[in-house]
Amino acid sequence: MTKTELENCIHDYGKEIYSFCRSITFHLQDADDLFQDTFLKAMELISDIDYEKNPKSYLLSVAYGLWKNKKRKHAWRNRIAAVFSLTEELDFDSFHTPPDSLEQEFLKKEESDLVRRAVSRLPEKYKFPILLFYMEDLPIAQIAYILKIPVGTVKSRLHQARKLLEKELEAVLDEKHT
């Protein structure tokens, strides 16, 4: 891949990759750092990226790998000495188009918050296939490539995640109606 092709990838896929970074980190500053680190790493690996073979999946894989490494390092450091980082909470409201009424806005925000919290509470092995499948609209084969797991495992994890989300969201909705 050339620098021009990488620039084209940033232009073509930058918003989607940034959106993925925001949804896995849930913090504005961490998402910005991850997004920047992803493309810095892409610059290092520029000769390994084949522009003709779906660079978006490759870049999502880089972002996922960097995030996983950072999380592992953070967990290791916390075991040695508790380190608390101050992070700015993500403002998801800026992503929504304005609804027709205040009531619709409130209901839409409440529903989206419920789903977002439910997804964030999923174990990581279920969270990432869900995010990649529904948020990034990636096919199962590409998710398997990004997560470096077999296709059957992706299907299984998607199925299990849907069951967990359904169970949790039903419990929350039943609780609200009583």
Image: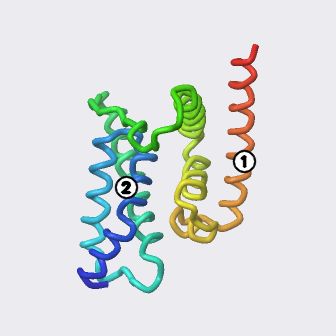
Location of residue 156 (image quadrant): bottom right
Residue 158 at x, y percent in the picture: 68, 53
Residue drawn 29% across and 33% down?
Answer: 87
Residue drawn 74% across and 34% down?
Answer: 167
Instruction: Spot the residue most to the front.
Output: 100
Circle 2: is it few (<14), some (14-19), or many (20+) Cα within 10 Å?
Answer: some
Residue type of the residue flagged with mark 1: Gln
Residue type of the residue flagged with mark 2: Tyr
Residue 99 at x, y percent in the picture: 51, 38
Q: CA distance from mark 2 to mark 1?
A: 27 Å
Q: Is residue 132 above or below residue 29?
A: below
Q: Quadrant of the C terminus?
A: top right
Circle 1: is it few (<14), some (14-19), or many (20+) Cα within 10 Å?
Answer: few
Location of residue 27 (image quadrant): top left
**Residue 40 horizontal side relative to residue 135, left or right:** left
Q: Which residue is mark 2?
A: 18
Instruction: Spot the residue most to the top.
Output: 178
Residue 165 at x, y percent in the picture: 68, 39
Residue 89 at x, y percent in the picture: 35, 32
Location of residue 38 (image quadrant): bottom left
Q: Is residue 176 above or below residue 25?
A: above
Q: Which residue is mark 1?
A: 160
Q: Is residue 50 above or below residue 130?
A: below
Q: Nearer the viewer, residue 52 or 143?
A: 52
Q: Quadrant of the N terminus?
A: bottom left
Q: Nearer the viewer, residue 4 or 143?
A: 4
In contact (CB < 8 Å): disc 2 and disc 1: no
Residue drawn 47% across and 83% down?
Answer: 53
* Element type at mark 1: helix
Q: Earlier in the sequence, mark 2 or mark 1?
A: 2
Residue drawn 34% across and 41% down?
Answer: 74
* Element type at mark 2: helix
